[in-house]
Image (spheres, helix red, strand yellow):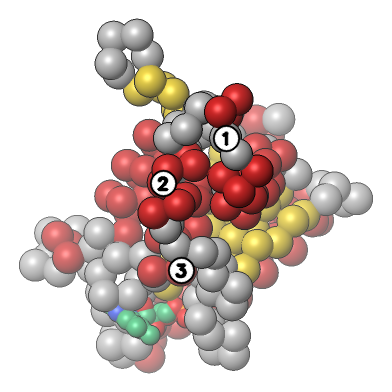
Amino acid sequence: MLLCINSSVRDEGSRSRLLVDQFSAAWRDHHPGEAIAWRDVGKNPPSHPSADYITANYTSPEKRTREMVAVLEESDQLIDEIFSATHLVFGVPMYNFCVPSMLKAYIDNLVRIGRTFRVMPDGGFEGLLSGKKMVVIVAKGAIYAKGTSMESFDHVEPYMRTVFGFMGVVDMQFVAADGMDFGDEEYRDISFAKAGYELKKIVERWQLER
Ligand SMILES: Cc1cc2nc3c(=O)[nH]c(=O)nc-3n(C[C@H](O)[C@H](O)[C@H](O)COP(=O)(O)O)c2cc1C
């Protein structure tokens, strides 16, 4: 199953949503009849962590009260959903050089001891979300080309790589549509079209790797 996770607050005019749509349409062409699930954290942001959530999370499952179980329910559902997917596509608008806070809240619900990672006897960590293929589509207003002074401002990819890598996702690709607001019109059109082309190629590659 493909799980599409959108995180733009915009509906109309959202480039990340358009690219996720292109990706899911290409996926559907290659996998007719296969389920596609949708999660919209831009429009329906998950809860932020609370003190009760943290207490419940760090109480071992057999000792949790009914209230603790209830407090973890939303997180459990989001984790069950991501576990049920084999392929993940994220639509991410860059907000202030990182991911939108709604996507951060979603991720805060996913990173759970005993569910998406565990502590090893030697104190190291093991991610439990292994075996999934993931693509992150990032729409950015400005241009963050390698070798320019803007390159180091882009915290979307390093953050997503770190946190999903921590949870055990190894197969992760990034496709950027940059210059969406500040590049000239020609750059914008080429950047968007190039992102769409790269996504089509990823769907084809994933098909071959099955
Ligand atoms: C709150 C907010 C913060 C933004 N911050 C940045 C930023 O730090 N760098 C950047 O290049 N673009 C920034 N942008 C522009 C968006 O990344 C760009 O418009 C992108 O296309 C948004 O994704 P969407 O089209 O899917 O909504 C910001 C936009 C908003 C609304």
Picture quadrant where residue 127 is located: top left
Res. 19 in view: no
At mark 2, the secondary structure is helix
**Placement of 1 over or under 118, stated as above or below:** below
Q: Residues within 10 Å of mark 2 (few under 14, many from 20)?
A: some
Disc 1 CB within 8 Å of nearest ligand 1 atom: no
Residue where numbered disc 1 is placed: 64
Give me the residue at 32% from left, 42% from top: 162
What amino acid is found at the position of numbered circle 2 in the picture?
Ile
| Alpha carbons under labels 3 and 2: distance apart | 18 Å
| Alpha carbons under labels 3 and 1: distance apart | 27 Å
Q: Earlier in the sequence, mark 2 or mark 1?
A: 2
Q: Residue furthest top?
A: 121
From the viewer's perspective, tell me whether residue 17 is left or right of residue 53. Answer: right
- Quarter occupied by the C terminus: top right
Give me the residue at 28% from left, 16% from top: 123
| Alpha carbons under labels 2 and 1: distance apart | 12 Å
What amino acid is found at the position of numbered circle 3 in the picture?
Met
What amino acid is found at the position of numbered circle 1 in the picture?
Arg
**Placement of 146 over or under 16, stated as above or below:** above
Residue where numbered disc 3 is placed: 102
